[in-house]
Amino acid sequence: MAPASNSKRTGKWMRRVSRVGEGLYSNRRRIATVAVAILTVLVGYHVVFGRDGLTAFRNKQHDLHDLKRETVSLQRENGQLQGHVDRLTSDPNAIEHQAREDLHYTRPGEVIVTLPSNDNGKH
C-alpha cells in the first residue's frame, strides 16, 4: 500500500507542477514585462543614485566649482604676499615699516598707543 500512496502523492505533485508550469507559460509575456519593468527601475535608480550616478556627478561638479573659486582666492592672496615680499626685499622704507610694526619699534620722540580690542570676551 505504501508504493501506491507514494505514486498517488507523486501524481498530485506532478499535476500541481504541471498547472503551475502552464500558468507561467500562459502568462509569460506579463511576467517578462514585469521583470523588464523591475530591471528598468533598478537600472534607473543606479544611474541616478548609484556610486557614480548623476547625484554623485552633480556633487563633484559643486566641489570642483568650490575648489576653483578657492584656487582663484588663494592665487590672489599669493600675488599680494609676493608683492609684499618684493617690497620687503627692495624697499628700505617697507622693511623699516614692517620692523616697526612687528617689533613695536619707534623713532626717537614717537609714542606707541595700543588700543584695546572691541572684543570684550563676549560673542
Image (cartoon, rainbow, N blue to C red):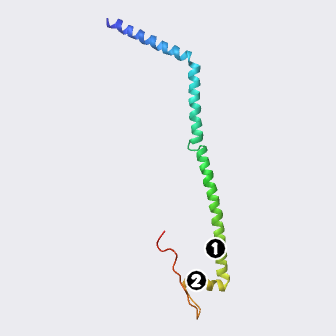
Where, quadrant-wise, is the N terminus in this rendering?
Answer: top left
- Name which residue lies at 65% across and 83% down: 94
* Residue 23 vs residue 113, the one in the foreground: 113
Q: Is residue 31 left or right of residue 87?
A: left
Which element is circle 2 on?
A: helix
Image quadrant in which you'd find residue 34: top right
Residue contact between numbered discs 2 and 1, judged by CB atoms under 8 Å: no
Q: Residues within 10 Å of mark 2 (few under 14, many from 20)?
A: few
Amino acid identity at mark 1: Leu
Q: Is residue 82 above or below residue 6?
A: below
Q: Is residue 118 above or below residue 34?
A: below
Looking at the image, the residue that sits furthest to the bottom is 109
Q: Which residue is mark 2?
A: 101
Specify which label sits upstream in the sequence, 2 or 1: 1
Q: Which residue is mark 1?
A: 81
Q: Is residue 79 above or below residue 31?
A: below
- Name which residue lies at 38% across and 7% down: 8
Q: Residues within 10 Å of mark 1 (few under 14, many from 20)?
A: few
The residues tagged by marks 2 and 1 sit, at their Cα atoms, a distance apart of 17 Å
In percent of width and height, residue 77 lies at 64, 69
Amino acid identity at mark 2: Glu
- Name which residue lies at 59% across and 20% down: 29
Which element is circle 1 on?
A: helix
- Name which residue lies at 58% across and 47% down: 56
Q: Is residue 91 above or below residue 63?
A: below
In percent of width and height, residue 19 lies at 49, 12
In percent of width and height, residue 59 lies at 59, 50
